[in-house]
Image (cartoon, coloured by chain):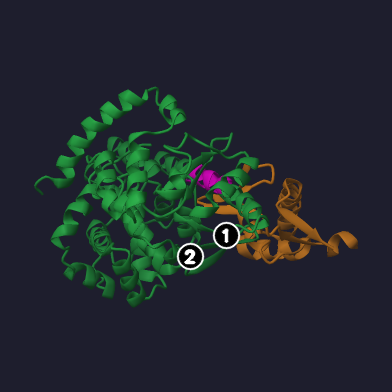
Amino acid sequence: MTVVRLDTLPPTAAAVGAHGLPGSELDPPGEPLAPADWERLIEVVRSERLSGLLAAAVTAGAWPVTDDQHADVVDAHVESMAAALLLERLVIDVSDALTESSIPFRVLKGTAHAHLDFPDPALRPFGDVDLLVRPEALPAVMARLEQLGLTPVSPQVRPDFAQRFGKSLVLRTSGGLELDLHRTLVPGAYGFRIPIEDLWSAERTFGVGGSTLAALGDEQRLLHAAYHSVIGGRARRLMALRDLAEMALYGRFEQARLRELAQRWGCEPVLASAVRDAWSTYRICDVTALSRWADRYEIPHRERRLLALHATPEVSYAAQALSAVASVPGMRSKAAFVTSLALPDRAFLQERGTTRSAWLARGIRRSVAAARQVFGPT
Amino acid sequence: MTVTMTRFRRRQEALWRRVPDGVIVLQPSGDPVSVTGPGRALWDALAVGGTRTELARRLSSTFDVEEHRAVEVVDEVLGHLVDLGVVREEP
């Protein structure tokens, strides 16, 4: 995965991400970019999955380009759309298989955003398929998907880790298409705070290739976009922020229901930060009830550290895992969570070319460093 | 007579996207194919569907080309799309 930090992106990348947002004060350049600036932009457009927005801007005559630059845009967009179509074929095949086995699921992230939250799905490329399934159904789902040629990319820490504690499992076809099978929306403490039933309490359906697929409800989808834009590093953050802005400005969510869910999931700081980031990144001048709330919301002191632990790319996985222990429900589960991480299965260790003693020794060193990040001064 | 009354329509299962110069359609085989030029307008017209004559008329009004030329385009592109399995014939 290419990780692109938002603060290192060219300013024109945000202008691409803002194309079509009427409340944005970001303007495209007045003339075609110089070759070096263009090379950098087109690289970021590809990695941040902004080709749909750039293609729309160029087609509308809103973004000046040379003939060569126009060809670059077409190439990038055609490539990303071809990939999206192959992934849609995969999601339909998986949907047919799970429906046949009476296994409920929800389509998450890019595929759902493209069809539900953008006026044209071509504006929203995506690079994998994300599905939510009930934790207890994970083994049956994996067995069914294996029949379709989807196999785990790597062994789990423990065979039941994804079902009990994980955010998701990555599966891959022989052709290299990826499918993330989710138990919940986000890793670590924030993930454990989400009542699983809340993810299944509403749905929004959409049609793809003659099939009807179910996504999360409008409020849950918006919160997922908020998590994605704040947590887990900076990769593809511009698109996640655009997803959020698109839903916040034009979505069908109910403000009261959104706030109620955010409170129950303990993610109000995430929502407020994400909305503020979207408004500042895209310089959106429109004020909505949600942006007004986000501006006024004060993140409680105890939540600031947790947010920083999940929002800062430099923070280690060990620190995030350590901070999650408190949110794992029940003492037995806490013990099982820590044990799983400290003493993984042999297959997991072999795949990483390490031994149990080496893993433990490294784990202790990392835990000490992680403890400083989790419990040290803010 | 039968040929002229045959209606053509996009297959509901067809997966496609708009791109700057046309549309990309995924063939049932899994290979994407690009439909450009007048083919794009034909693809749009195939959402509702119609006979060759109706489609040519719609293409002609969209692209301001003579109807006999539009018929040639429809014959060429439509046959290709049917062969690819993304457009179906309705008797």
Q: Residues within 10 Å of mark 1 (few under 14, many from 20)?
A: some
Q: Which residue is mark 2?
A: A200
Amino acid found under the numbered disc labelled 2: Trp
Determine the chain carrying the residue at label 1. A
**SS assignment for the magenta stretch, majority:** helix
Q: Is residue A197 visible?
A: yes
Query: In front: A131, or A166?
Result: A166
Label 2 or label 1, whichever comes before in sequence order: 1
Going 16% across and 63% down the picture, which residue do you hit? A300
Query: In front: A309, or A60?
Result: A309
**In the rendered image, residues at marks 2 and 1 fall on the same chain:** yes
Quarter assignment of residue A358: top left
Badge 2 element:
loop
Q: Is residue A25 above or below residue A306?
A: below
A345 vs A8, left or right, is right
Callout 2–callout 1 Cβ contact below 8 Å: yes
A332 vs A213, left or right, is left
Quarter assignment of residue A2: top left
Going 57% across and 38% down the picture, which residue do you hit? A173
Rendered hue of chain B is: orange
Q: Which residue is mark 1?
A: A104
Badge 1 element:
loop
Which residues are drawn in magenta? A77-87
| Residue A284: x %, y % from top left | 25, 64
Q: Residue furthest left?
A: A377
Query: In front: A371, or A308?
Result: A371
Rendered hue of chain A is: green
